[in-house]
Image: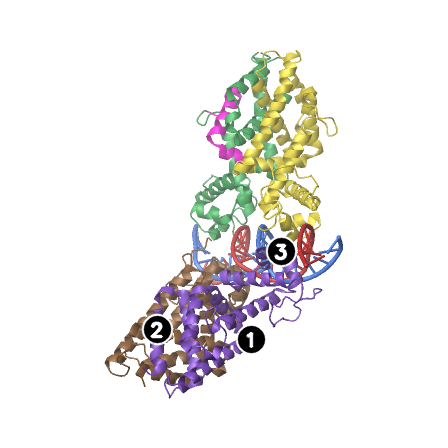
Chain colours: A brown, B purple, C yellow, D green, E blue, F red
DNA sequence: AATGAATGAGAGTTCATTCAT
DNA sequence: AATGAATGAACTCTCATTCAT
């Protein structure tokens, strides 16, 4: 517990690269991310993480005093990743409120099939959140941001007459968030039976009241 | 590998009580279930399970040759539990197709708030399913059963004019399953922000087309 | 920390052999004792202790939850050993007050040259006592017992006219304890220069006032 | 092994300040000294020493190629300290043979209660000496010096008629050294029960034959 | 003169599993 | 049917030491 780096749960962004060594730090977190996706927290071994990042465990511990700190780092980039990709296809601009809701949702589905790793990690983190208040708090905040963003999209859609006028926007935001999360969860177990387009059409019916 | 019981992944029901010792076996599985809910697979220790069941690890291994077999047992009762309680309030009769869909969904929500443990375990199992084909297969089958049951409910509702006539029933079943799963997932992280009744109302609007 | 044995610093005697496994437990403590004498606490490795006792580290931890518990065990037998051999040659009877003081002191010197290990460990323990209150307390008690025993010997000697009549008995007991301890300490560093007999003669002069 | 300083066990004095950097070197040794007193050799960490001296471990290794070299440095200053303060109160002149023996002994007791650290380190070093010939040699030499000095004091006292005429001076020197060492050892464990003045009186009786 | 980064070797501890009884 | 004892293999974490800069 004597290293200076990452002493304090490092919640802020990680990719600053302002200091020397931040590069290796990120490599380690990414390696851990991949390994969690592949084997779960249960199967996460510091040695494997270090190997994957091309360093030794001692080096890993030079950057992260404990495994727990490393996991915090993984959570940070996972949330970051969600934030970044949430509202658009990977390379699209980030102007959220302008984006069409359908695009947002489709971006998510697209992301799901492209990078299922992120969703597996999200699942692992959610399970963890149920017993780790620190993780729970961060996920809660992330959820609330997403809901906020969806809400403003919905509000705009209602105002412009694209959606039903009687829509209960906060409830609809919860509704959409649950639906989206649920879809990604099911897709992990049975990717071939999700009837994506037809489910999208049902969402459309709900949004517009046909 | 000298013990006889549970050699072969024991997928079938567990509470038959045909053999002697089935009682202790179930106690062990239930203890494991509770511990998974409390600490995740990550934190599951055979010794703790044995302690909780009032026996020693050696005894545990008499009933379950490996930890993996124990976990299979947990999965079995978890799925069993879902099947049993899926369509009704705990004590209601089990005639699925006759049950009103709203009741089914509300039963699930009710179950969620009453026994969150089950959902935590489900989450853990889902994460596991993404890397364990055996678990994946079982979850897939369970999903498909639920979907079947929901579908028949929906079909009946459409026929009787309770629901929209243009409903794409298979897609709607997926839709409902995702929504339900998503809701329980979110509730684990942030139980106070789920706007249950208002979300239920939105579901109603979608089902009926208002 | 789940083993039942030695959970609680085991202060009582160790060689009861009433339970099964007490034998191995003692072997481990004796192995640790020897290794501390040979390499100090600094060089004490659980793996070496286990090897010396003919078991694996895992077995060591079956009996002693932590290294610290093992060390407590070592301290216990060290103090025991001092108590046992304090007042007489190894096989002499234990009737302390009857024993002549010269015999007591010579027994100690004899013990020193026969089993220097005990004194090395005592030195290590004394150093430890300066920072570990638990060890300090036990040593203090052991000291006080020795002083008590010496005092009664002195008292008897004075009464019988064997020693000076103006002797300050409590101070003389401290005096003798310090002298004895100091001699064993010096003997460790330079065994050939202790002039044992001549020092004994000087003690005699002090005791009798010539 | 690229650093130049202290390659060869550096036994000589340390505070010559002839070279640049000797200052920092001494700081490191003093830091090590304090840490040994506080935690023993067992708990001595190069990183802590460096921290305490306000440098990094890398710097420590610039001055001391190995931990062992650092420890040698500590031993050197410890012995130095004993030599310096041995015969007098801190600020008294150093003409040993002129000093009264009682003063010498009282100086030692005074030193003990003022700077117990020195005695803890001495204890640690003595324990080490039993297995490290290099340390043993140095301690032996230091002992012999002290004995020499005490002897000359005793001789003078006998000649002047201050002490008993039948005193066996070499034995008495050993006697006094053992007693002194033993007293400091006991004082570490139980400072409140040493009856200092009364023990001093008993020493007086022995010295003078009353 | 001084350091940040990196590491090899090893430390104590844990854990699922075995087996004689 | 049940267990105490034992273990191999691994785990996370530590530490003195190195080296390019």
> What chain does mark 3 sit on?
B
Position of B171 relative to C86 (above/below): below
Mark identifier at residue B138: 1
Q: Is residue A21 visible?
A: no
- Residue D110 lies, in percent from the top left, at 48, 26
- The segment highlighted magenta reads D93-121
What residue occupies the far left of the structure in this picture?
A159
Q: Main secondary structure of the magenta part?
A: helix
Q: Residues within 10 Å of mark 1 (few under 14, many from 20)?
A: some
Q: Earlier in the sequence, mark 3 or mark 2?
A: 3
Q: Secondary structure at mark 3?
A: loop
Residue D106, labelled with which disc? none
Work out whether E4 lies above or below C115: below
Marks 1/2: CA–CA distance:
30 Å
Q: Nearer the viewer, residue B58 or C174?
A: B58
What is the x, y in percent for residue B38? 49, 60
Residue B55's tag is 3
| Residue at numbered disc 2 | B199
**x, y percent for residue E11:** 59, 51
């Amino acid at each position: 517990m004597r290293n200076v780096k990452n002493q304090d749960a490092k919640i802020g962004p990680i990719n600053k690269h302002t200091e020397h060594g931040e590069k290796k730090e990120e490599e380690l977190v990414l390696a851990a991310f991949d390994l969690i996706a592949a084997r779960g927290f249960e199967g996460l071994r510091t040695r494997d993480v270090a190997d994957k990042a091309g360093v030794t465990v001692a080096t890993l511990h030079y950057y992260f005093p404990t495994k727990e700190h490393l996991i915090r780092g993984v959570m940070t980039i996972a949330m970051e990743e969600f934030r970044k990709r949430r509202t658009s296809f990977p390379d699209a601009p980030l102007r959220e409120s302008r984006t069409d809701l359908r695009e947002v949702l489709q971006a998510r589905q697209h992301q799901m099939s492209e990078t299922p790793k992120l969703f597996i990690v999200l699942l692992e983190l959610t399970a963890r959140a149920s017993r780790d208040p620190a993780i729970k708090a961060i996920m809660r905040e992330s959820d609330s941001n997403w809901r906020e963003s969806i809400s403003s999209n919905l509000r705009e859609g209602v105002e412009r007459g694209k959606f039903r006028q009687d829509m209960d926007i906060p409830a609809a935001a919860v509704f959409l968030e649950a639906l989206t999360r649920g879809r990604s969860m099911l897709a992990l177990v049975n990717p071939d039976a999700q009837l994506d387009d037809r489910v999208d059409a049902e969402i459309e019916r709900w949004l517009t009241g046909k």
